[in-house]
Image (cartoon, rainbow, N blue to C red):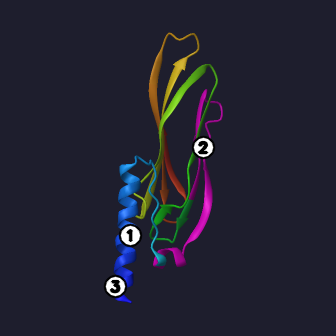
Amino acid sequence: MMHTKMAAKRLAVLITALIALLGSATIVTTTPASAARATCRTLHLDNGGYWWSVVLPSMTLPICYNGSRVWQSGNATPRVNTRGYVLDGIDWAGTYNGGGGWLGAGINYRLTLSGGWASWTCAARWTIDARGNVTSFTRC
C-alpha cells in the first residue's frame, strides 16, 4: 500500500514537471484532504466596477477554497474589451500562489490607440482570498 502511494505521488510530480516544461500557463494541483472540504465555483472577475472605462479586462476563473487555502480548479478564460483601442493580443493569462492563503489572477495584454500612433502593454491583477472573495483589483 505504501509503495502504491509513493508511486502515485511520483507520477503526479512527473506530470506536473512535464506540464511546466511544455509551457502551460496554468498548473492545477489539489490534495485529497483539501478537496474533500472545499467549495468550488466559477468567479467572473471584472474591471472592479469601472464600467465607463474604455479598456475592460475580465476573466472567468474556476476556483476551489476551504477557508485557509484557495486554488484554480479549471481553465481561465481571459477577455479584454476596448472602445477606442485595438487589442493587439493577450500575452499571458493565469494564476499564481495557488494552494496558499490567497490566489493571484492576471492578464497581460497589448493595446494600440485607434489610428496606430501609440501602443503599450498593460496588466490586470486580481487577488482572491481563501474564502473565494475578490479582495483587490489593479490595472494599468
Q: Which residue occupies the foreground of this view, 11 or 108?
A: 11
* Number of other residues with Cα within 10 Å of mark 2, as a class: few under 14, some 14 to 19, many 20 or more: some
- SS class, disc 2: loop
Checking the image for residue 46, the label placed there is 2
Q: Is residue 115 left or right of residue 93?
A: right
Please give the range of residues in magenta.
33-62
Q: Which residue is the site of mark 1?
A: 11
- SS class, disc 3: helix
Disc 1 or 2, which lies upstream in sequence?
1
Question: Which quarter of the image is occupied by the N terminus?
Answer: bottom left
Residue 140 visible in the snapshot: no
Q: CA distance from mark 3 to mark 1?
A: 12 Å
Say above or below: 29 vs 139.
Answer: below
- Image-quadrant location for residue 132: bottom right
Mark 1 or mark 2, whichever is nearer to me: 1
Residue at 61% x, 55% y is: 43
Q: Which residue is the site of mark 3?
A: 3
- SS class, disc 1: helix
